């Protein structure tokens, strides 16, 4: 039986006005406009305490980590828009991935091993947060055994990058993003098809 291709988009920032949430939302809009079922999720709706093994031993895995993992499971491809903090991953994204990685059912790292991932970033700076993606990629690939597409997409100068409809003013960038989303959908289909 084939699994329908569904893409999940979320960002490693929960703040109101996040450039990366905007990028993830645009990704979901582009996917839907191209016939690919898509969901945008806000990590602000899945708050979790800072990971602490004693906390896990005492209280178990937070319900929000389980809920997010379930959401990931009903999608076949996942795009993460990753803010760059000091050339690295944000604490929010690392903490979220760490909690979800503690879920052992049906097997360790199941949801990471069975989805396809793609990465993007956005920042007010000139490099668009691209440097932080190396760390995110390492966490996903080496730490969580995930398949991550080699392509990645950055939106520099984020404050000026969007038009009034939420699309990228730079049409080449918009097309590049669309191509990445379509590739993610194809890869997810091959893996799950
Ligand atoms: C602790 C911290 C470190 C940051 N380091 C970088 C950085 O290395 N490179 C960069 O482009 N922006 C950096 N920024 C700026 C972020 O890109 C900017 O705050 C961005 O808006 C965060 O993403 P968001 O809009 O999705 O929340 C940093 C911001 C903070 C708070």
Image (cartoon, rainbow, N blue to C red):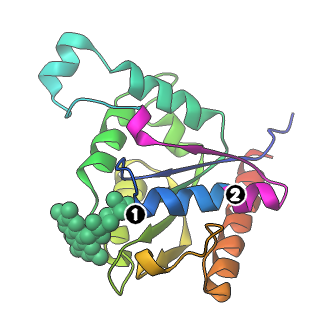
Image coordinates of residue 193 in percent, x first then y, are: 81, 46
Considering only vertical position in the picture, is 15 above or below 83?
above
Q: Residues within 10 Å of mark 1 (few under 14, many from 20)?
A: many
**Which of the pair 129/183 is nearer the observer?**
129
Image coordinates of residue 75 in percent, x first then y, are: 66, 40
Residues under labels 1 and 2: Cα distance? 24 Å
Residue beneath disc 1: 137
Residue beneath disc 2: 29
Question: Relative to 10, is 172 on the left or the right?
Answer: right
Q: Residue at x 60, y 34 (%)?
A: 73
Q: Residue at x 36, y 73 (%)?
A: 123
Q: Answer yes or no: is residue 125 visible.
A: yes
Residue 104 position by quadrant: top left
Question: Relative to 73, is 140 on the left or the right?
Answer: left
Image coordinates of residue 91 in percent, x first then y, are: 23, 50
Q: How many marks?
A: 2
Q: Which residues are magenta?
A: 29-45
- Dot 1 falls on a residue whose secondary structure is helix
Q: Quadrant of the N terminus?
A: top right
- Dot 2 falls on a residue whose secondary structure is helix
Q: Is residue 35 magenta?
A: yes
Image coordinates of residue 171 in percent, x first then y, are: 68, 86
Q: Is residue 106 magenta?
A: no
Q: Answer yes or no: is residue 85 visible.
A: no
Question: Relative to 68, is 86 on the left or the right?
Answer: left
């Amino acid at each position: 039986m084939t699994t329908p291709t569904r893409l999940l988009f979320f960002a490693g920032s929960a703040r109101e006005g996040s450039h990366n949430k905007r990028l993830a939302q645009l990704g979901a809009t582009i996917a839907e406009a191209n016939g690919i079922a898509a969901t945008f999720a806000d990590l602000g709706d899945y708050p979790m305490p800072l990971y602490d093994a004693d906390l896990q031993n005492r209280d178990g895995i937070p319900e929000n980590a389980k809920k997010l993992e379930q959401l990931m499971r009903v999608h076949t491809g996942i795009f993460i828009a990753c803010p760059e903090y000091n050339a690295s991953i944000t604490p929010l994204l690392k903490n979220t991935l760490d909690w979800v990685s503690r879920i052992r059912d049906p097997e360790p790292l199941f949801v990471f091993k069975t989805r396809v991932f793609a990465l993007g970033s956005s920042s007010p700076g000139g490099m668009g947060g691209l440097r932080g993606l190396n760390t995110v990629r390492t966490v996903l690939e080496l730490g969580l055994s995930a398949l991550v597409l080699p392509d990645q997409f950055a939106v520099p100068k984020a404050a000026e990058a969007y038009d009034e409809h939420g699309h990228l003013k730079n049409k080449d960038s918009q097309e590049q993003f669309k191509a990445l989303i379509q590739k993610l959908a194809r890869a997810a289909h091959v893996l799950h098809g």
